[in-house]
Amino acid sequence: MSQILQSPVSFSLKDSLHGPIEFEPPPPEKRSFIPKKRETRRGIQPHWWKKIYNRKAKEIDVHIWDPLMDPVKKEELHQTIKDLKSDLSPDKEGNDSNLMKALLSNDSDLFDIFLDLINKVLELGDIPVEWKNYYISLIEKKSGAIHIESMKDQLRPIAITHEYAKLISKILANRLNRILMENEILTPAQRAFIRNGGTHQCISTLLNILEDMIQKRKRNDKKSFYLVSYDMKKAYDRVQFFSIRPTLERFNLPESFIKYLENTQFSLRACFKTFYGLTEDFSVTNSIRQGDPLAPLIFVLFTDALHEGLKSSPIFTHLDETLKCGYHFLQENLILASLGFADDLTIVADSWEDIFAMHLWVLEFLEIHGGDLNASKTVYLISDAQDNDSRWLPTLDGMQAICPTRSDTPFRYLGIYVNMDLTWEKQISIISLLILDWGSKIGKSGISAMKALETYKTILLPKLDLGLTFATIDQKTLAAWSRKILRYIFRCDHRPTNLLTSMSIEGFSELTNCALISERYWNNHLKEFVYNLNSPTTLAGQSTYARLHSLLNKDQRNGMSLYSIKLTKRYRISRFAEMIQHFRKSQVLIITPPDGIKIAYEHVQSILGIINENKSIHIFTDGSTFPGNNTSGVGIHIEDHQR
């Protein structure tokens, strides 16, 4: 990093934490250049700290948190105990959830005593010293993948905390989650550990971005697009105690809750569970405990500042105008900078300046809070990347370079393999291998055809669901998989039957009441699309609307805006038209009231049922409703061409 960045980036970095930048992305002939290691300054407050970490940062009314530390009532405690999952691992004193359910039933004499104890703990803002001791159990991140040379990177530490302390954390976590959802104060980029979140939303949003990129690239093939998918090193373990209070104050949480969290997270002692028993206790000096019900939500609050900062990269305070980093959609004036699911972070941009500024903010945030990147597992794609591309990114220690790869390079994102070109060969091969592996196992097991059919429904299909929901798979491949699955099931019947061997795939599906791969594929796509339409406040919903508005033809009819999906388009959102055409050759029209399209997710099956009955659907925005329901404001019009 030699002067002030003599690269495609046009702004200087004078006001960053580390002073003038000493890094210049190297030209191709200097590809081997490695940036010099710089001195770490973790724990030092940078110039942007007070702007981001203060009680007015998110303009949250403190009174929304009033229910958080209220005394626990009988009904709340009873429901929390009832909802406890069965634990396989008891705490150090031998308590587990099954014992809690047995001893603390609603009519138990111990119930009222324990209720008083919980309320006393909340009043004092601390738990007994004995409850602060726990042990750590190491579990495999991926089954069967442990090697002695890299064991520390292949094991995940799970804290088995005291059962009583865990129950109180569960009550507070339920309250915190409820308040977060009712007030929508979290960044929409983070979708983990909240009741209306999930990996599906992150994947949908990423695919919408990539589809929009493809459309832009067709209009201007000289335009470059950038994507970085980070791998964080031991994200939970690296959260520092000094980061927790500023994070909670940023959300204007009450002092009573912050004190309780500090008292129950600090001054802890732990040990490891080994094959030979428990090790000696040691003091815990940082990290939030995976296994504590509050830990995931605290981590989500912690990453909120990271995601919000990616929109403008706060380290560049000297610029005349605030940066608006991220990917700019063709329509809707929508800009998306990042996607997050717990410690999984992906950033996107449509300029080199933006992606570099965003990356520097990630480095700054991690260094201040004690985090780090795994450079070898971080994926960096550029739509027009070339060999020896000079647009590489520095690592946190300045000793490595994260080099870009081509747009057709597949990477694993939340369980599915995807690339910038949206070619799905890798994911399709994964599905083929899963089917092959399932067929081999049922063949060797000697089970009957009926049991094999049951394993198809309960074991194989759930494994395939993610790929069937998001990948683009042609009908020929889907039919080939269905035939292969049918053969595997028939082979389990040791008495060959002419009826079975001559039965069509469709006949077998109808006889066994078992969905074919192709049916599952279309149903999953339709559910995902309709769910996104019904989630306008999420990034998945916003990006879906943006894609629709860039793909649909607009017309005016009877004072309402009418949009028709072009059947010739090959983008993922337009598959809604293909889906309807798959069920019945139909024309699809979507009518939007001024406040947007609203489709109730729970009625998807009703829609499919009507379509399969070869009936027209006329659902307008003038008060018409779903059959048998009072939900209004829906706009779908389907006419059957066969009539």
Image (cartoon, rainbow, N blue to C red):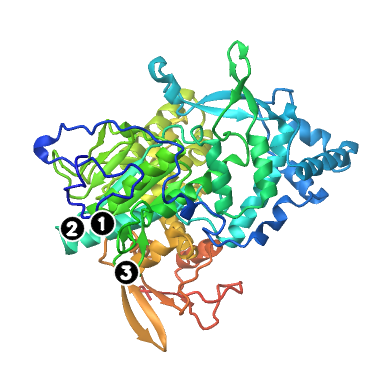
Residue at the disc numbered 2: 223
Contact between labelled residues 1 and 2, with CB atoms less than 8 Å apart = yes
Q: Position of residue 96 (x, y in %)?
A: 72, 29
Q: Which residue is mark 3?
A: 331
Q: Residue flagged by tag 1: what amino acid is it?
A: Asp
The disc, 2 or 1, on the residue closer to the chain's N-terminal end is 2
* Cα–Cα span, label 2 and label 1: 8 Å
Can see residue 3?
A: yes
Tag 1 secondary structure: loop
Q: Residue furthest top?
A: 276
Local packing at callout 1 (Cα closer than 10 Å; few below 14, some 14-19, many 20+) is many
Frontmost residue, 639 versus 561 = 561
Q: Is residue 417 visible?
A: no
Rounded to the nearest whole Å, what is the CA distance between mark 3 and mark 2?
17 Å
Marks 3 and 1: in contact by CB < 8 Å? no
Q: Secondary structure at mark 3?
A: loop
Question: Which numbered tag is attached to residue 350?
Answer: 1
Q: In the displayed structure, does residue 591 sit left or right of residue 60?
A: left
Please name whichever residue, 509 or 263, is drawn nearer the observer in this view of the structure: 263
Q: Residue 260 appears at what percent x and percent y?
A: 69, 42
